[in-house]
Amino acid sequence: MDVLEIIGAVIGIIYLFLEYKANVWLWPVGILMSLFYVVIFFHGKFYADAAVYLYYIGANVYGLYAWLKRSHHGESSGQSTSSDPIVHTPQSMIWKLFVAFVLVYALIAFVLVRFTDSPVPYGDALTTSLSVVATYMLAKKWLEQWLLWIVVDVISTALYLWKGLYPTALLFTIYVVVAIMGYFKWRRDMLDASSMAEVVE
């Protein structure tokens, strides 16, 4: 299992680099990473995390489709495919995302407490439900997805250290740093794209 965890961590670093660069290849790599972590987390009794990586497989497929569709639309309309790649989370979606988070958290926590031997059901449910929302936001290229990942990664690092999943804990420590850097990079790219669009107009 240690070998699988190390391989998964390496793939995770590649995934994070691609996400930082807003590169479409993050989605295929994300599918591969998800397959590894389904096994790793199930073995470590992080059942909700294992389940969310099953969700990630589908989410990565959707994300790839959404990004390619947006890119194709930009090309067909004569616009640069990178002219408006990143935007703020729409105000109208914030409360909907919050309600989705609460409902998913409550459901996962109930299942873990009632039907599994998870040692940290509420922590597992928290990181999983936040990850579900953050992944959806990533597919939409909403800047604030990074803020959710920072919270998820900090909590996850503590949980995996406690559980003894040290390569994974190290990976998530790196995630914290890169998520902070990613937020500022995406924000800079968004502002640059906005300024460029104003000049063109």
Image (cartoon, grey):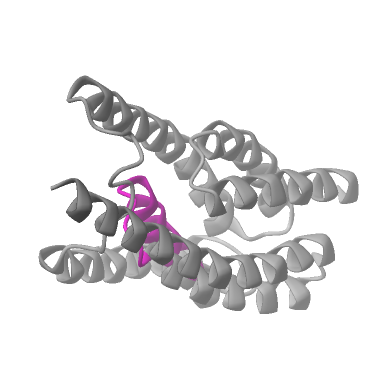
Nearer the observer, 24 or 164? 24
Q: Estimate the x, y position of residue 109 in percent, counting from the top left.
A: 43, 69
Instruction: Using the rendered view, name the quadrant where residue 63 is placed.
Output: top left
Q: Say which residue appears at 30% left-offset and 67% top-offset.
A: 101
Tell me if residue 53 can be seen: yes
- Does 11 sit above or below residue 46? above
Magenta part, dominant SS: helix
The outermost residue toward the top is 76
Q: Estimate the x, y position of residue 198 in percent, counting from the top left.
A: 18, 55
In the displayed structure, does residue 19 sit left or right of residue 79?
right
- Does 28 sit above or below residue 20? above
In the displayed structure, does residue 111 sit left or right of residue 199?
right
Q: Say which residue appears at 55% left-offset and 40% top-offset.
A: 26
The outermost residue toward the right is 3
Q: Say which residue appears at 16% left-offset and 64% top-offset.
A: 96
Q: Estimate the x, y position of residue 168 in percent, counting from the top left.
A: 75, 61
Nearer the observer, 4 or 185? 185
Tell me if residue 113 can be seen: no
- Does 67 sit above or below residue 37? above
Q: Estimate the x, y position of residue 139 in percent, counting from the top left.
A: 36, 45
In the displayed structure, does residue 100 sit left or right of residue 174?
left
Q: Say which residue appears at 49% left-offset and 51% top-offset.
A: 52
Nearer the observer, 158 or 104? 158
Q: Which residues are magenta?
A: 127-144
Q: Is residue 133 magenta?
A: yes
Instruction: Using the rendered view, name the quadrant where residue 76 is placed.
Output: top left
Q: How many marks?
A: 0
